[in-house]
Amino acid sequence: MDILKIDVEGFEFEVLKGCLNLQINCILIEVGYEREPTKVHFSEVEIYMENMGFQLCGIYEIMRCLTDKKKISYSNNLYIKKNLINN
């Protein structure tokens, strides 16, 4: 099982598009929950990964906003190919 970890400060989609032909079964990707240039937004990643046949399976290293500890700033989300989960 191949795993890809992506943390490239806002260029995550470029990396994902560049690996379309690779056999990657798990992707750990940093996502943001606020709109900012150095993070890809969770909602956009969720739609993209769903369309690519992946399912969200875990959320790790949750970082809170410095100015408002009630809000999540970013996390590392684990996506796994659906066909591996459902078998």
Image (spheres, rainbow, N blue to C red):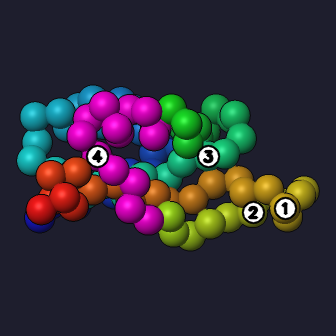
Q: How many residues crowd around disc 3 within 10 Å: few (fewer than 14), some, or many (20 or more)?
A: many
- The front one of 57 and 74 is 57
What residue is drawn where x is 43% and y is 33%?
47
Residue identifier under label 3:
32
Mark linked to residue 62 = none
Question: Residue 15: where, in percent of width, then height?
Answer: 32, 37
Which amino acid does the dot numbered 4 rest on?
Phe
Q: Is residue 55 magenta?
A: yes
Sequence-first tag of 1 and 3: 3
When asked about the image quadrant of residue 80, the answer is bottom left
Mark linked to residue 70 = 1
Residue identifier under label 4:
54
Sequence-first tag of 2 and 4: 4
- The front one of 53 and 28 is 53
Distance from Cα at disc 1 to Cα at disc 2? 7 Å
Question: Residue 17: where, in percent of width, then height?
Answer: 27, 29
- The front one of 21 and 80 is 80
| Disc 4 to disc 3: CB gap under 8 Å | no
Under circle 4, the secondary element is: strand
When asked about the image quadrant of residue 1, the answer is bottom left
> Is 4 on the left or on the right of 63, as rendered?
left
Under circle 1, the secondary element is: loop
Point out the stretch of residues depicted in magenta: 45-58
Question: Residue 84: where, in percent of width, then height?
Answer: 15, 59
Distance from Cα at disc 2 to Cα at disc 4? 26 Å
Query: In front: mark 1 or mark 2?
Result: 1
